[in-house]
């Protein structure tokens, strides 16, 4: 038998295990690698690492890094916390006292300033009195900055004393009768106009960082009905906007009337109001006519009341009366809000159509528009035409009451205060102050939210356009604060005014916050990056790392052996 074979014929060479190796024989070692081969391999591995560290890694960092423009975060936070502006509202009053002696005028102005300036800590308006007479106009302040002109009329004929007062509808002028000459009486008349305005401003400021303790004290003294009234006005009002689109629509249940003299009606009733409101916003007007307009399928429809002989709509059906699925109404798309005014002419078999409980034919839909029903048949018809052929067209006279209603609804929907009822100019000026304040608060809140977002997401990119918008917003909001304190509420040739600057600041802050490149990064977490890079870099990185570790250990052993050998 061959001694190198086992019982089963297997090979019993040294390769089968050390257990069969004779004692004293050393373990075989692989042949020594040539120095040239070793250097070549190490050079290759080192070259790969040099390329990765010197070229790949910097390029990857450069292409994947996020650019973050510098933002004035401390200033933005100061505005958000109400520290950047002490909100006060200047209220310059000019006194016109024809026939009065100059000394008496100056004394009256001083007494008025003392009375109005000590109304308590809750006053938001800073009253300044500028006396004048019939011979000369007071130089300060400029006419456009005067909030109210008080005209004191002399007794005519002598000996008569009239204690009545009235406002000019189109001007901010208060006329006082000859019986009102004392400073206390005049101050009471001014307070009657300004107290509701201060209450509305305190309502806007309440719950914000700009609401100082004295403002909250003023709000606490308000009556419950005032708070409820302001809540109702706020709920039905559209969001402040630089542009409103007014859409007037005629919907007819059958095929007539098929036309209406809307241009004449708008020119008579709506255009003058829009011109007066142009200092608040821009307005565009569109009209349309839709025939064979059916009721919305979401309502039960009118029911006939035999006692009154009228068709009645339930109050719960008013919100769904507009058939949005079939009536081509203009939606609020793009810049500005759309305010819809709908005139509905029911079919003859459903006329007269009224609202149950109230018997009215008009109602307002908060933050949407107004609806009116025009009954052409029945005892309540306002149609003035007598010929059957005239029923195809609604004249401007037929639209008188409807247009007056729409004009009143427009003032409610944009938030115009109801007081003082005798002067549209004073109501518009009050709304200017409220809107400028609301926009300033909104801008400050948006800037604060942007600052918190940038701090919370350190990897979010901040392009230069955002920094530019933020700088623009901060500049205009600071100017708005200055204009409010100086009483510059309206736009002039040289100044946007408080409202104009507040609108510009709000638009710039919204543009910065909703920057598309930033919004996309908000929903792109770091975990998503890991899921993308690991499948790409893993197969390439593992062999490179293992080869580097292996060659590093080999180099370490060789150096260690040389040290031991010496």
Image (cartoon, helix red, strand yellow):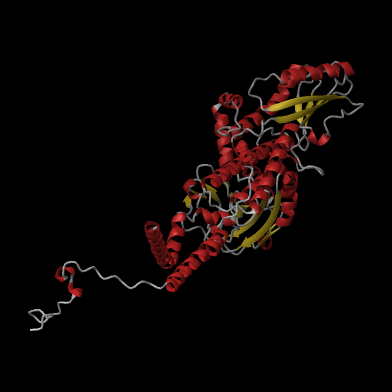
**Residue placed farthest to the bottom in the image?**
1
Kindly identify the residue that appears in the image at 38 percent across and 72 percent down: 33
Q: x, y percentage for residue 32?
A: 36, 71
Image check: 539 left or right of 161? Answer: left
Q: Nearer the viewer, residue 270 or 333?
A: 333
Image quadrant where residue 29 sits: bottom left
Quadrant of the frame with the N terminus: bottom left
Residue 192 can be seen, yes or no: yes
Q: Is residue 464 left or right of residue 107?
A: left
Q: Is residue 449 left or right of residue 299?
A: right
Decide if residue 245 is on the left or right side of residue 299. right
Residue 53 at x, y = what percent? 52, 61
Residue 152 image offset from top left, x and y in percent: 82, 23
Quadrant position of residue 121: top right
How many labels sit on residues? 0
| Image point (56%, 52%), residue name | 352
Q: If the image is split into quadrants, where does the C terminus sit?
A: bottom left
- Residue 48 sits above or below residue 396 on the image: below
Q: Nearer the viewer, residue 402 or 231?
A: 231
Figure check: 359 above or below 172: below
Task: Give the image location of residue 223, x and y in percent.
Answer: 56, 26
Residue 416 appears in the figure? no
Frontmost residue, 108 versus 514: 514
The relative height of residue 13 versus residue 334 in the rendered view (above or below) is below
Judged from this view, the residue extending furthest toward the right is: 135
Closer-to-camera residue (152/55): 55
Q: Give the quadrant of residue 388.
A: bottom right
């Amino acid at each position: 038998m061959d001694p190198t074979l086992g019982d089963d014929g297997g090979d019993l060479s040294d390769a089968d295990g050390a257990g069969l190796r004779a004692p004293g024989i050393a373990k075989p070692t692989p042949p020594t690698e040539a120095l040239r081969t070793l250097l070549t391999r190490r050079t290759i591995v080192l070259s790969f690492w040099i390329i990765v560290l010197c070229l790949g890694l910097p390029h990857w960092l450069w292409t994947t890094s996020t650019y973050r423009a510098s933002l004035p975060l401390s200033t933005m936070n100061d505005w958000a916390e109400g520290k950047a502006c002490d909100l006060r509202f200047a209220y310059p009053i000019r006194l016109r006292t024809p026939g009065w002696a100059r000394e008496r005028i100056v004394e009256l102005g001083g007494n008025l300033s003392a009375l109005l300036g000590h109304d308590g800590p809750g006053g938001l308006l800073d009253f300044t009195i500028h006396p004048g007479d019939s011979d000369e106009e007071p130089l300060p302040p400029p006419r456009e900055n005067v909030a109210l002109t008080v005209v004191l009329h002399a007794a005519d004929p002598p000996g008569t004393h009239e204690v009545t007062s009235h406002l000019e509808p189109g001007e901010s002028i208060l006329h006082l009768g000859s019986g009102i000459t004392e400073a206390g009486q005049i101050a009471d008349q001014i307070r009657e106009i300004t107290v509701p305005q201060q209450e509305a401003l305190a309502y806007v400021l309440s719950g914000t960082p700009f609401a100082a303790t004295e403002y909250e004290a003023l709000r606490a003294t308000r009556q419950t009905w005032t708070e409820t009234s302001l809540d109702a006005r706020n709920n039905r009002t559209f969001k402040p906007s630089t542009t409103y689109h007014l859409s007037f629509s005629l919907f007819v249940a059958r095929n007539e009337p098929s036309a209406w003299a809307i241009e004449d009606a708008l020119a008579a009733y709506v255009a003058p109001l829009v011109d007066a409101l142009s200092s608040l916003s821009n307005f565009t007007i569109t009209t349309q006519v839709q025939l064979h307009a059916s009721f919305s399928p979401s309502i039960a429809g009118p029911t006939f009341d035999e006692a009154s002989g009228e068709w009645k709509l339930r109050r719960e059906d008013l919100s769904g009366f507009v058939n949005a699925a079939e009536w081509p109404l203009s939606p609020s798309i793009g810049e500005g809000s759309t305010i819809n005014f709908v005139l509905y002419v029911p079919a003859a078999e459903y006329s007269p159509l009224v609202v149950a409980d109230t018997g009215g034919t008009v109602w307002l839909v908060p933050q949407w528009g107004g609806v009116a029903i025009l009954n052409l048949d029945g005892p309540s018809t306002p149609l003035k035409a007598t010929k059957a052929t005239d029923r195809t067209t609604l004249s401007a006279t037929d639209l008188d009451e409807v247009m007056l209603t729409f004009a009143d609804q427009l003032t409610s929907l944009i938030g115009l205060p109801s007081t003082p009822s005798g002067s549209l100019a004073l109501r518009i000026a009050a709304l200017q102050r409220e809107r400028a304040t609301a926009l300033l608060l909104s801008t400050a809140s948006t800037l604060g939210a942007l600052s918190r977002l940038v701090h919370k997401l350190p990897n979010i990119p901040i392009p230069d356009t955002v920094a530019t918008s933020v700088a623009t917003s901060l500049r205009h909001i600071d100017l708005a604060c200055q204009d409010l304190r100086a009483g510059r509420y309206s736009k002039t040739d040289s100044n946007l005014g408080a409202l104009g600057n507040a609108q510009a600041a709000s638009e710039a802050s919204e543009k910065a916050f909703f920057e598309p490149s930033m919004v996309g990064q908000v929903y792109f977490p770091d975990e998503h990056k890991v899921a993308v890079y690991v499948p790409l870099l893993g197969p390439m990185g593992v062999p490179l790392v293992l080869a580097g570790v292996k060659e590093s250990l080999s180099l370490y052993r060789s150096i260690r052996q040389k040290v031991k050998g010496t």
